[in-house]
Amino acid sequence: MKNLRPSFLAVTIKCPALIAARTNWNVSCRPVALRAAEVLHLPPAHLIALPAQVQIAAVVIEKNPVNPFRKGIGLFRIGFGYDAHRFVEDRLLILGGTQIPHPLGLEGHSDADVLVHAIIDAVIGALGRGDIGHHFPDTDPAYKGASSLNMLKTVAEWVKRDGYRLNNLDATLVAQRPKMTSYLPSMRSQVAQSLEATASQVNIKATTTERMGFCGRGEGIEAFAVVSLVAISEETPVPI
Ligand SMILES: [Zn+2]
């Protein structure tokens, strides 16, 4: 059995008493399943118990759309995101979901939250799902003036659906002005909330380019983000 190297195990048990009391079967067969996992060197999280008519069988489950162990795509995923927006008049300046007093705002189809866009792109990249423009096209009226934090919440749902959670996120805003320091805690808190994470998992910082380049000339703002995701399967065992 060891030579099969199963990544998942379905334990099935023939027991008239358990079949008769079907409501209780999955609780009752747990010790047997755990012992089988021990023999096969499988973590308990990889067990799925199924009722059947054989004594004990171990099989490799071929399809599990959620668990990344089954996809062979790794326990950890890294994603990188970049975005830049131009300053224009008559627009609010919103960064990390936080409105910042400034004479100019950023041009864009949505609320033009350049920081959150970079973060979204990093998360989408970590999931291997393309980029923000593909999922939230700026030709779609649904996203006109839309809150980028809401888009981030949607992407956070995809993270869960794919069997991951945020490990940590690090992002950098590049702007000559305005001064960001006093707004960074609010950005951090809003981004963390949207990703259902704690503030300690999210780091947001700001820098200037010492007046070099388009950010240095005050023409716009750019943002960079790196995200790491970790598979939740080891932490959330499948109930058996
Ligand atoms: Zn953008």
Image (tube, rainbow, N blue to C red):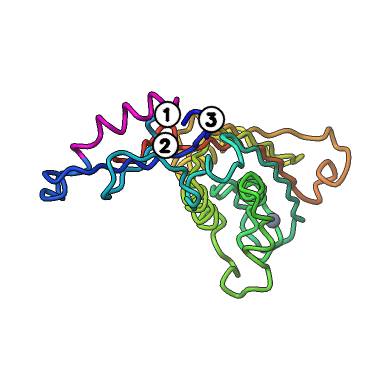
- What's drawn in magenta, residue-wise? 27-41
Earlier-in-chain disc, 3 versus 1: 3
Q: CA distance from mark 1 to mark 2?
A: 6 Å
Q: Residue at left 85%, top 45%?
A: 217
State the image coordinates of residue 138 (x, y, percent, origin top left): 68, 68
21 or 171, which lies in front? 21
Mark 1 and mark 2 residues within 8 Å of each other at the beta carbon? yes
Q: Which residue is mark 2?
A: 46
Is 201 inside the magenta-drawn segment?
Answer: no
Nearest-to-viewer mark from 3 and 1: 3
Q: Quadrant of ligand 1?
A: bottom right
231 or 182, which lies in front? 231
Q: Which residue is mark 1?
A: 43
Location of the C terminus by quadrant is: top left
Q: Which residue is mark 3?
A: 3
Q: Residue at left 11%, top 48%?
A: 21
Which quarter of the figure has residue 225?
Answer: top right
Q: Residue at left 69%, top 61%?
A: 133
Q: CA distance from mark 3 to mark 1?
A: 17 Å
State the image coordinates of residue 189 (x, y, percent, origin top left): 48, 38
Secondary structure state at the residue bearing disc 1 = loop
Mark number displayed over residue 136: none
Which quarter of the figure has residue 72?
Answer: top right
Secondary structure state at the residue bearing disc 3 = helix
Earlier-in-chain disc, 3 versus 2: 3
Mark 3 and mark 2 residues within 8 Å of each other at the beta carbon? no
Residue 59 left/right relative to 219: left
